[in-house]
Image: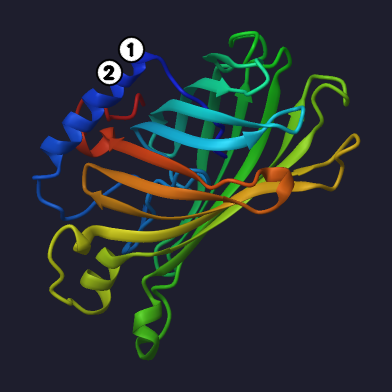
Amino acid sequence: MLQRFNLRSDGARSACATTVTLFACLAAAPTSADAHAVVGDRVFPATMTVDDPGVGDEFDTQFGHIKSPDDDGDTMNVNTVSYEWDKLITKNLAFSIGGNYVSQNAPNGNSAKGWDNLSLGVKYLVYANAEHEFMASVGLETDIGGTGARSIGDAYSTFTPTAYFGKGFGDLPSSLGLLRPFAITGEIGPNITTASVGNGPNSLGWGMTLQYSIPYLQSQVKDLGLPQPFANLIPVVEFPMSTCTAGACSGHTTGTINPGVLWTNRYGQFGVEAQIPVNRASGTHVGVLFDAHLYFDDIFPNSLGKPLF
């Protein structure tokens, strides 16, 4: 999903701390490899702002900070904490539920904090080609209007049917071996609101990632003997974008360029990214994202991470 700015309360921070503690325990586990978005020899990591093409049992928590323009054109500090839980219904179909706690500190006295609208989603893996390291999925996400705090959430609902893809370059010839660890992923889908154009303009959400997998380099191209944590790093650049399709903003695109790095093993991953606005309408300050992600399907394969059917 395209990331939305949010922040949670102290109780939620405790939940995040619990997740981090669990990660600390898991970091000592063997780093051989699996994860939920696997096709052939390729593992697509769970990127932060542009959703990967896989389905799985997983839990994600994310913290973000950025200075963003408000409705008056002033700059406000936006701190966010989000969570998302994805549950496999079958091996190719997953259901998700997510929420965001947002803290907006505006200079003009219009500060606000609270939960954003509840998000529900479904996602289905429609195609996978191991030889060419390609995956494609389709999904539908709904932000339910009126379920969040009045100062944060919208009164209207938003429906987003989305297509996802991922392509690894492991099928390149051996003479281009150093390029084989590269991969791209992407998503695209309209954000269709139940509001009038003036209150909730429709838009097109789209984004891509470019990533370079050091684990793939080590295991499939050439073992460089890199020590931990470098052997499990995946440098990544994400491009989450939104193009307004109705109203006065029609045709205008906002978004960020997010360079960062992910550390991953069989059971989960940590990540950190910068958020660089692509234009003035997107903001003028660089933000930061921190992420902790657990693969329940690998941690609890016979219980919590097992498909319902």
Snapshot quadrant of residue 68: top right
| SS of the residue under disc 1 | helix
Snapshot quadrant of residue 24: top left
The one nearer the camera, 130 or 174, is 174
Quadrant where the image shows the N terminus: top right
The image shows residue 54, relative to residue 143, as above or below, that is below
The one nearer the camera, 206 or 86, is 206
Residue 87 visible in this rendered orientation of the protein: yes
Mark 1 nearby-residue class (10 Å; few <14, some 14–19, many ≥20): few
Residue 240 visible in this rendered orientation of the protein: no
Amino acid carrying label 1: it is: Gly
Q: Where is residue 206 in the image (x, y as percent from the top left)?
A: 65, 48
Amino acid carrying label 2: it is: Ser
Give the CA separation, mark 1 to mark 2: 5 Å
Is 72 displayed left or right of 79 in the figure?
right
Q: Position of residue 188 (x, y in %)?
A: 65, 47
Is 232 displayed left or right of 252 in the figure?
left
The one nearer the camera, 164 or 152, is 152
Which residue lies most toward the right here? 248
Which residue is painted at 48% across and 35% down in the image? 65
Number of the label disc, if any, that sits on residue 14: 2
Mark 2 nearby-residue class (10 Å; few <14, some 14–19, many ≥20): few
Number of the label disc, if any, that sits on residue 11: 1
Q: Do the residues labelled 1 and 2 touch (CB within 8 Å)?
A: yes
Q: Where is residue 23 in the image (x, y as percent from the top left)?
A: 19, 36
| SS of the residue under disc 2 | helix
Quadrant where the image shows the C terminus: top left
Which residue is painted at 45% across and 31% down in the image? 94
The image shows residue 186, relative to residue 181, as above or below, that is above
The one nearer the camera, 78 or 228, is 78
